Image (tube, grey):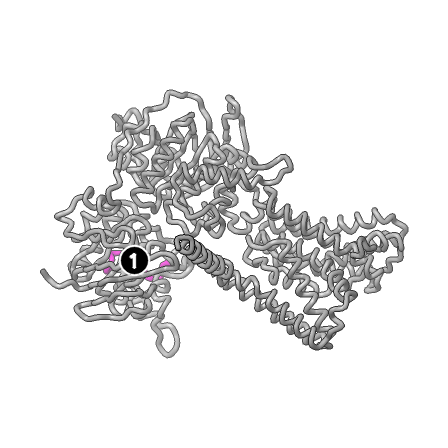
């Protein structure tokens, strides 16, 4: 009798704690966070019904490879956005880096040399953006928009809109080979996410970044070198543009000004916002941004397979962005 | 006894997780001023926001002139003759007084703004509060006190029968305060019902007739002020908490200089600032609002640029010349603007507290040691008696006093040799104020040098061992810790307290 009493009590408290757990686990903000997964579920269900070929392993690997370059750029964007900024120049800087690297390789430069050039071009562009935003206190949107036109203008000018071929089997195999059947671009992305996550969440500079993005004044009063941190985020996004240039030039076997077309910026911003990075600064994670990139790639890929036209696709992507920016501002309230 | 003009009965307001107002009654009479007092978080603001139509009560009713009224929006509040003079003035500085006053409902004629009628009505209310300036003056050229008057004028525009004043004197000089009180007296004479919210208990005896005290969302007591005393009010406010006053700390014997500032200049703001802080002393930087007190502190730590000046900090026993920005490494800075400059509001208590000390929390691998971060935060939460539910709680959900302790705790974690405390007790209730004073006292005891800036004379008198007097961007003299209240008042308005004039004892 007594034992029964006790056991019923304990199960009672268990169910209460379960309820509590559920209430905590599914707060309205948490539900909003889970919305992308919910949408992804619907999209995948639709695909299973109408485009079963979507699920063959070649297509899945293909999606991840595509998502890897978008994801890398989204990590760079996350750094900038967490700091409260915006970098619209990522794709065009990426294209310009790829062109410089490809031209060096064409002129007989070594693989290492060409890759370094691509990284350096990205970082230099990032330094200029960062200096203008952090030290000259210019508006990020305007600075990076200008950098975007400068980079893409330069790219078109030096290539005459002709793509620069990359024909170096060794380079291809270094960048694209598979390890345990997984293409290296995916592994590079995974490694970068791990490093970025640790850097964002566990290093002092990462913590400073979140503080600066949440409230720059408070960060300053607390002795944090806010300007240097913000400068660094743009250099980092330039670095990731360079890294993406390396992978993409290998994958496409060419570099052209067209790599950084307008649609790519939109995809990067969408990836970050869908992944929970706030445009208001201070909130977001590299992992979220990469998951966002995978989400965006699945959407694009499935629309291709369902033979949705390119322009309809643009409309859908635009709606996705607006929806998630709306969610972001709802959470802010 | 006359019937009350305004009566609130059994008002209840719940927020998720807390019941902010628990069945409160309130009566206010025409032609009288009712002081509404209580510690932070006592529910005063919530109650008044209900009256002002900003919040809807969950239970209870409101009667005005014996009739039950429903107030569901600020507009309905205005329609019922209720006006609110807010503490934080929301003005558009580039617009004129008359535009600011009418901004929510411009008078129009034929679809265009009717400037003449706007000017006329503005002039009328400005005259009413005794302001001399023209209706088309831009608000940016007005002093804080004048802006407050404009704010009151705006409230008068709707010819209200009930006016709520929320901490109207917190940023006023004593002359401006006298002017405000004249206005309130004349409003009372016209039969207006005044509700006066304040932390300054002494001033309510000058201007109010009755007091209602709230504590923890409940009605703690009411009465005619002529029958009440400050201790009685304080007892209602804080219950049986004992209010021990500090004996002022003995003047420290240490002559070790920890900070020396020479000829600090910032054009138009600061002129030839010379300042020395010794180990273990509390120096009160005293002066009027706008005398440059805050600016001195900000310039030394490099938050504001300087044009000239030398800053020396004691590093390992000897003074070393440092750049302004560098000085911040040795100085813990508690700013006057807690919400906008002191805290990362959406972030956790723990992260707010570790913010200045991350460098000290790094492991061998240059990662932040989260276990130590938690332990240290826990330690200071306990030491400072911060009331929180968990270390991960966002600081924006804490009360003002606990938020301020988090800011102080952040610097205690870093443990610098120098602290700048700018208005550390602003907006805090009696209990939290006493806690902050204790903390400052202990810090000095443990050898830190503290530069204390405060507009509240009780605070500064309780703690400072000497006073440095500021006036119009200059340091005009010093007073010893024994200076009296009247010495300080005289000094603040520029009566230079030098040894020759013998102002001090």
Q: Quadrant of the N terminus of chain B?
A: bottom left
The answer to whether A144 appears left or right of B279 in the picture is right
Question: What residue sits 32% from the left and 59% below the top?
Answer: B134
**Residue B406 rendering spot, x and y as whole percentages:** 43, 43
**Residue B207 rendering spot, x and y as whole percentages:** 19, 51
Task: Tell me which corner region of the image, top left, top right, bottom left or bottom right, holds residue B499.
Answer: top left
Residue lying farthest to the front in this orientation: A1
- As for residue B128 lying within the magenta part, the answer is yes
The mark tally for this picture is 1
Question: What residue sits 72% from the left and 54% below the top?
Answer: A189
Q: Which element type, helix, strand or loop, lies under badge 1? A: strand
Residue sitting nearer the eye, B365 or B479: B365
Asked whether the viewer can see residue B267, the reply is yes
The answer to whether A69 appears left or right of B33 in the picture is right
Residue sitting nearer the eye, B305 or B13: B13
Magenta region: B127-138
Instruction: Give the vertical position of A122 relative to B30 (above or below).
Output: above
Question: What residue sits 44% from the left and 42% below the top?
Answer: B407
Residue sitting nearer the eye, A148 or B106: A148
The answer to whether A291 appears left or right of B216 in the picture is right
Assign the magenta stretch its main secondary structure: loop
Task: Tell me which corner region of the image, top left, top right, bottom left or bottom right, holds residue A168.
Answer: bottom right
Question: What residue sits 67% from the left and 72% below the top?
Answer: A314
**Residue B136 rendering spot, x and y as whole percentages:** 35, 62
Asked whether the viewer can see residue B493, the reply is no
Q: Quadrant of the C terminus of chain B?
A: top left
Name the residue beneath numbered marker 1. Answer: B21
Instruction: Give the vertical position of B420 relative to B256 (above or below).
Output: below
Pointer 1 indicates a residue of which chain? B
**Residue B79 rendering spot, x and y as whole percentages:** 27, 70
- As for residue B230 lying within the magenta part, the answer is no
């Amino acid at each position: 009798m007594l034992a029964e009493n006790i056991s019923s009590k304990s199960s009672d408290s268990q169910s209460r704690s379960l309820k509590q757990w559920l209430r905590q686990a599914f707060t309205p903000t948490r539900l909003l966070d889970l919305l992308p997964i919910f949408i992804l579920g619907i999209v995948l269900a639709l695909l299973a019904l109408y485009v079963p070929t979507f699920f063959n392993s070649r297509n899945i690997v293909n999606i991840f490879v595509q998502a890897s370059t978008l994801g890398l750029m989204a990590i760079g964007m996350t750094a900038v956005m967490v700091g409260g900024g915006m970098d619209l120049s990522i794709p065009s800087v990426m294209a310009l880096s790829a062109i410089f690297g490809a031209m060096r390789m064409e002129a007989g430069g070594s693989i290492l040399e060409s890759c370094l050039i691509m990284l350096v071009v990205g970082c230099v562009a990032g330094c200029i953006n960062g200096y203008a935003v952090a030290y000259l206190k210019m508006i990020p949107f305007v600075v990076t928009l200008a950098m975007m036109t400068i980079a893409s203008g330069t790219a078109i000018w030096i290539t005459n809109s002709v793509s620069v071929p990359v024909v170096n089997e060794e380079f291809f195999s270094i960048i694209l080979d598979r390890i345990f059947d997984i293409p290296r671009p995916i592994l590079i992305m995974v490694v970068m996410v791990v490093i970025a996550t640790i850097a964002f969440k566990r290093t002092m500079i990462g913590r400073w970044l979140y503080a600066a993005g949440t409230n720059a004044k408070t960060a300053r009063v607390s002795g944090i070198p806010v300007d240097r941190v913000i400068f660094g985020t743009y250099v980092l996004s330039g670095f990731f543009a360079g890294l993406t240039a390396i992978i993409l030039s290998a994958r496409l076997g060419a570099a052209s000004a067209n790599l950084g077309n307008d649609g790519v910026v939109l995809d990067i911003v969408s990836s970050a916002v869908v992944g929970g990075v706030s445009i208001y600064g201070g909130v977001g994670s590299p992992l979220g941004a990469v998951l966002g990139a995978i989400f965006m790639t699945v959407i694009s890929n499935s629309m291709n397979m369902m033979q949705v036209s390119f322009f309809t696709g643009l409309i859908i992507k635009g709606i996705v962005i607006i929806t998630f920016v709306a969610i972001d501002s709802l959470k802010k309230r | 006894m006359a019937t009350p003009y305004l009566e609130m009965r059994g008002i209840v307001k719940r927020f998720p997780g807390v019941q902010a107002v628990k069945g409160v009654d309130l009566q206010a009479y025409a032609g009288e001023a009712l002081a509404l007092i209580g510690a932070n978080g006592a529910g005063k603001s919530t109650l008044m926001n209900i009256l002002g139509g900003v919040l809807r009560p969950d239970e209870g009713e409101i009667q005005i002139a014996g009739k039950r009224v429903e107030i569901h929006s600020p507009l309905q509040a205005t329609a019922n003759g209720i006006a609110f003079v807010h503490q934080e003035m929301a003005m558009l500085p580039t617009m004129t007084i008359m535009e600011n006053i009418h901004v929510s409902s411009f008078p129009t004629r034929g679809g265009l703004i009717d400037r003449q009628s706007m000017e006329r009505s503005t002039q009328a209310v400005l005259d009413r509060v005794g302001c001399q300036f023209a209706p088309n003056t831009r608000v940016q050229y007005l002093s804080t006190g004048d802006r407050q008057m404009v704010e009151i004028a705006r409230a008068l525009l709707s010819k209200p029968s009930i006016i709520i004043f929320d901490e109207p004197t917190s940023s006023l000089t004593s002359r401006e305060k006298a002017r405000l009180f004249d206005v309130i007296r004349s409003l009372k004479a016209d039969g207006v019902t005044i509700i006066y919210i304040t932390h300054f208990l002494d001033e309510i005896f000058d201007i109010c007739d009755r007091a209602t005290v709230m504590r923890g969302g409940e009605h703690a007591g009411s009465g005619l002020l002529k029958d009440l005393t400050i201790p009685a009010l304080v007892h209602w406010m804080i219950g049986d908490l004992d209010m021990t006053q500090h004996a002022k700390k003995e003047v420290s014997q240490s002559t070790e200089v920890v900070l020396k500032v020479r000829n600090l200049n910032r054009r138009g703001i600061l002129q030839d600032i010379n300042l020395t802080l010794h180990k273990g002393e509390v120096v009160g930087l005293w002066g009027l609002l706008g005398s440059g007190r805050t600016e001195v502190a900000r310039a030394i730590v490099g938050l504001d640029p300087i044009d000239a000046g030398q800053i020396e900090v004691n590093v390992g026993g000897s003074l070393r010349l440092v750049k302004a920005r560098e000085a911040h490494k040795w100085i813990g800075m508690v700013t006057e603007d807690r919400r906008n400059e002191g805290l990362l509001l959406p972030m956790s208590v723990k992260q707010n507290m570790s913010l200045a000390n991350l460098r000290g929390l790094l492991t061998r691998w240059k990662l932040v040691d989260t276990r130590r971060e938690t332990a240290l935060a826990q330690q200071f939460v306990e030491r400072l008696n911060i009331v929180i539910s968990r270390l991960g709680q966002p600081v924006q959900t804490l009360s003002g006093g606990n938020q301020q302790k988090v800011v102080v705790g952040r610097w205690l974690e870093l443990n610098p040799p120098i602290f700048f405390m700018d208005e550390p007790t602003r907006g805090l209730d009696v209990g939290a104020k006493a806690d902050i004073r204790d903390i400052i006292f202990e810090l000095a005891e443990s050898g830190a040098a503290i530069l204390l800036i405060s507009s509240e004379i009780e605070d500064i008198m309780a703690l400072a061992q000497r006073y440095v007097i500021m006036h119009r961007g200059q340091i005009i003299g010093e007073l010893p810790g024994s200076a009296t209240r009247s010495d300080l008042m005289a000094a603040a308005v520029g009566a230079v307290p030098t040894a020759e004039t013998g102002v001090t004892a």
